[in-house]
Amino acid sequence: MSSKVLAGFFLLSYLCIAKTATLTGNTANAVVEEPEFTDVIENITVAAGRNVKFACSVKNLGSFRIAWMHFEQSAILTVHNHVITRNPRISVSHDKHRTWFLHISNVQEEDKGRYMCQINTATAKTQFGYLHVVVPPNIDDSLSSSDVIVREGSNETLTCKATGFPEPSVKWKRDDNTKISINKTFQVAEWEGDKLELIKISRLHMGAYLCIASNGVPPTVSKRIKVSVDFPPMLWIPHQLVGAPLAYSVTLECFTEAHPSSLNYWTREDGQMIHESRKYHAENILGTPNYKTHMRLTINNIQLSDYGIYKCVAKNPRGETDGTIRLYMSYPPSTSPKPTTTETPSRVKDWGLNDLNNSIYGHPSSLTIHQDKGAKYQSNLNEIDKSEQKSTSENDSQSIFTDQENGAIKKHYWLPTSIVQIILYVYFR
């Protein structure tokens, strides 16, 4: 027998029983107590997916029957102990006394509404209970933004659509808890609304954004949207002029910013790429944020051929750039005591040629020899300032010699260092 036939049979029986009970009462002229509800049906609020039950308590039911109905759907769900609806989530039970229970398992949003308990008296007696179904928030990925890649300087709108009951509220925040830059002058820790508009995006906008939806029904849900900002490489060189002595090692540095990550390498002035070897060691150190890179090139055991121009180069699909560093010859650091600045003479014979050499090579410095009543002494060695460094570095094989007479400077000479050493050696023997 089909379910439709069974449903019709039970419904007909329900109505016939009511008619029969009424006629029997009238014929016997007996005093029959009609059924009455003893308690109200409580309204229920439940989260979708949970189970609920409504209770309907009746006294003096006698031969009458109880039916449960969904008022908004105009559907008879159960009659007495029998389930009429084809909904497998509906069931009915009785406590063997006076209470009838309607069970709804795995409640869905469409189950909300008024549920009616009815006694099939001649004039049907009914009472209602309301089912409120609350639905936890859910973010609809098909209507929401996913990870995006944008050009620096453009605008972008992130969207986050959430469903649920009550209607969820949506807010945005950055995954790293930094403030959201709405524009150049306005920053917020959180932004309310299902849309987040980013104006004139810069690399500072790069990162993950969280869309968070809540409506008071747990759990709160979130979606992580990554914003990548593409821009061509940029370079910053802390020292464009670097000095190093022969046979020493030196490290050249460049700092780059690029997204996507750039291809970073070093070349000589003629464009010849520098490869890893015993002479050269190149490394790229990722910074924070990760679009920053620290480029380092270490040159070992410097020889004359190593001096000159070096280029750090950065390339990515958005463009390329390079920067230059000049490596020039300097002198080893002096191991002698720092020269005094007092004008009190100190006799040169206390200085060996080696000491003088160290002073000249170490800074380099200007060496002045004075005559004072036949006594020879060395004045203070004044380190050249940065304005002199370039010209001095271009004449690394020469030294400054100042000729003085009676305390007045007559003229300056640029002499090869080797000649100065010979003169000093002969002069102070």
Image: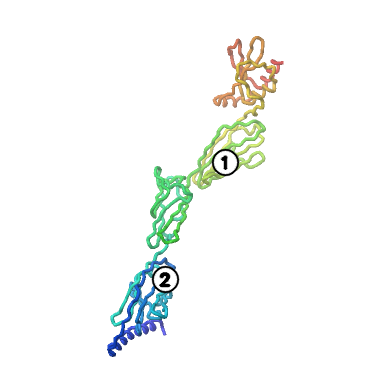
Instruction: Give the distance between the C-alpha atoms of the residues marked 1 and 2, in whole angstroms.
Output: 65 Å
Left or right: residue 243 versus residue 66 is right
Q: Which mark is residue 52?
A: 2
Q: Amino acid at mark 1?
A: Met
Query: In the image, what residue type sits under mark 2?
Result: Val
Q: Which residue occupies the extreme bottom position in the image?
A: 28
- Circle 2 sits in a helix, a strand or a loop, which is it? strand
At horizontal 65% and vertical 15% (from top left) the residue drawn is 377
Residue 347 point in image, percent of width and height: 67, 16
The colour mode here is rainbow
- Badge nearest the viewer, 1 or 2: 2
Q: Quadrant of residue 397?
A: top right
Total numbered labels? 2
In which image quadrant can residue 339 be found? top right
Quadrant occupied by the C terminus: top right
Q: Is residue 127 left or right of residue 387?
A: left
Instruction: Return the residue at label 1.
Output: 295
Q: Position of residue 270 (x, y in %)?
A: 58, 36
Q: Are marks 1 and 2 in contact (CB under 8 Å)?
A: no
Residue 66: % across, % down: 36, 80
Q: 148 above or below 314? A: below
